[in-house]
Image (cartoon, helix red, strand yellow):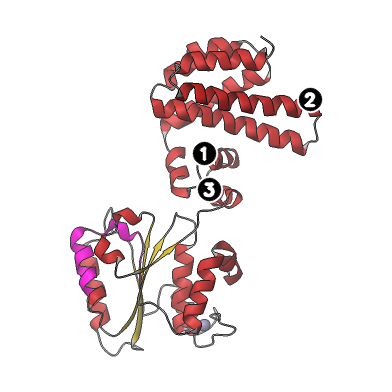
Amino acid sequence: MKQTALSEQQPLLYQQLQKSFEHGRLAHAYLFKGDTGTGKKEFGLWMAKRVFCTQVTDNQPCNQCNNCLRIAENEHPDVLRVVPEGQTIKVDQIRALKAEFSKSGVETAQKVFLIEQADKMSIGAANSLLKFLEEPEGKILAILETTSLAKILPTIQSRCQILHFQPLVKEKLVRALTENGINSNTAELLAELTNSFDKAVEISQDEWFNEAREITQQWFDYLTKDDLQAFVYVQKKLVKVFKEKEQQALSFDLLLAYYRKRLTQSVAKQQQKRVLEQQAQRIELILKARQKWEANVSWQSVCEQLVIRMIHPKL
Ligand SMILES: [Zn+2]
């Protein structure tokens, strides 16, 4: 990733780290907390390069010197990256890391290690790392990455400077999802439902979600054609899919997402005011229906009323 992208992606963190480098006030351990796709990995690499680059210019690593290139290729002897083996980071992995660091005579005194998905450390691994963070040997920069702070031992947290990575803005989330093989329609829909990359991927892999989505799409099609099939459809299909409270909540989110998208498209196509107003009204009706359901009116009758109000607003 380019440096300009880093400064755009996480402007505050970028400035903060730049200052720390300039004033030589780098912490010896950082804990990066943020969703997948928010730049944790890129920032970790950038910091490692910034430490080892032999031609730093304008406070930027050059990305061309031998050190920068070896870091990018994960071949630098003083930059070590730990990733989970299977489901966990095992104590042996941390021990191997420590052994590597205690070897003398490797290039420089300075060393950097990066631990991806640090929340996957076993208890043994976490404790082993903790001792290391308490009594580091030599000049060390540790960078731990996690999507969930709650899963990191408080004792480790207190040894690290915690940096919070901001969630992706909608268009970046959509881009990140499509780059990960999710088709653009689904990606846009997911971005309406969550601003977390990980949550979006989790939802997209859920079989129930994919069924719910198809059924809601059909319902939406009936509604936009003012087809009263939409009424029967609640009883015939929807109730069978949206059973749990959590699922019913999502039914409103999904329908809202479809209507919001339709409204955005209509605005872009400069459709008549009457069309836009109708769509905006429908969004309001969905929000009202949701409130009723939250006030304990049954989900089925809320949905049936919603159909009637949309298709025959004057009734
Ligand atoms: Zn360089």
What secondary structure is the stretch in magenta mostly built from?
helix
> Mark 3–mark 2 contact, CB under 8 Å?
no
Residue 254 placement (x, y as % from top left): 54, 30
In the image: residue 267, left or right of residue 19 = right
Residue 98 placement (x, y as % from top left): 24, 76
Q: Quadrant of the C terminus?
A: top right
Q: Amino acid at mark 1?
A: Leu
Residue at screen point 38% across, 24% down: 244
Q: Nearer the viewer, residue 272 or 95?
A: 272
Earlier in the chain: of badge 2 and badge 1, it is: 1
| Residue at mark 1: C-beta within 8 A of ligand 1 | no
Per the image, the residue denoted by label 1 is 193
Q: Which residues are magenta?
A: 114-132
Per the image, the residue denoted by label 2 is 274
Q: Amino acid at mark 2?
A: Arg
- Say the numbered circle drawn on residue 177: 3
Q: Secondary structure at mark 3?
A: helix
Q: Secondary structure at mark 2?
A: helix
In this view, the mark in front (3 or 2):
2
Residue at screen point 40% across, 79% down: 76
Q: Secondary structure at mark 1?
A: helix
Residue at screen point 47% across, 60% down: 165
